[in-house]
Image (spheres, helix red, strand yellow):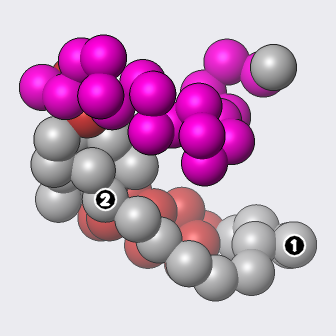
Amino acid sequence: MIEGVYSVEELGEAIAYNPEQWRPLVFSNGCFDLIHAGHIRYLTQAKSLGRSL
């Protein structure tokens, strides 16, 4: 497993084990096949809304 990449089951277990480390958890969607400055701004702003993105 790559650090920071979780399956749905692994994420659920990690959150249950230490919920304060994860909350608030922020989700994003989109297609980032060719990442550019707009994507970076979008993800940076999304990350600022919670503890984990």
Label 1 or label 2, whichever comes before in sequence order: 2
Give the residues drawn in magenta, as a range: 2-20
Q: How many angstroms separate mark 1 from mark 2 (CA)?
A: 21 Å
Badge 1 vs badge 2, beta-carbon distance below 8 Å: no
Q: Main secondary structure of the magenta part?
A: helix
Q: Can you give x and y, in whole percent of width and height, for residue 5 in the image? A: 67, 34
> Is residue 41 or residue 7 the one in the foreground?
7
Is residue 22 part of the magenta span, yes or no?
A: no
Residue 37 falls left or right of residue 47: right
- Whole-percent x and y of residue 43? 45, 63
Residue at x-position 16% and y-position 41%: 23
Residue 52 place in picture, x, y as percent? 32, 41
* Magenta region includes residue 16: yes
Residue under numbered circle 1: 33
Q: Please state which amino acid type lies under the numbered disc 2.
A: Val
Residue 46, visible in the rendered structure: yes
Q: Residue furthest right?
A: 33
Q: Nearer the viewer, mark 1 or mark 2?
A: 2
> In terms of secondary structure, where does tag 1 sit?
loop
Q: Amino acid at mark 1?
A: Asp
| Foreground of the two, 12 or 3 | 12
Residue placed at 54% from the left, 62% from the top? 40
**Residue 45 is drawn in which quadrant?**
bottom left
**Residue behind mark 2:** 26
Q: Is residue 17 left or right of residue 10?
A: left
> Would you place residue 47 above or below residue 1 in this image?
below
Q: Is residue 11 above or below residue 25?
A: above
Q: Image quadrant for the N terminus?
A: top right
Q: Is residue 53 above or below residue 26?
A: above
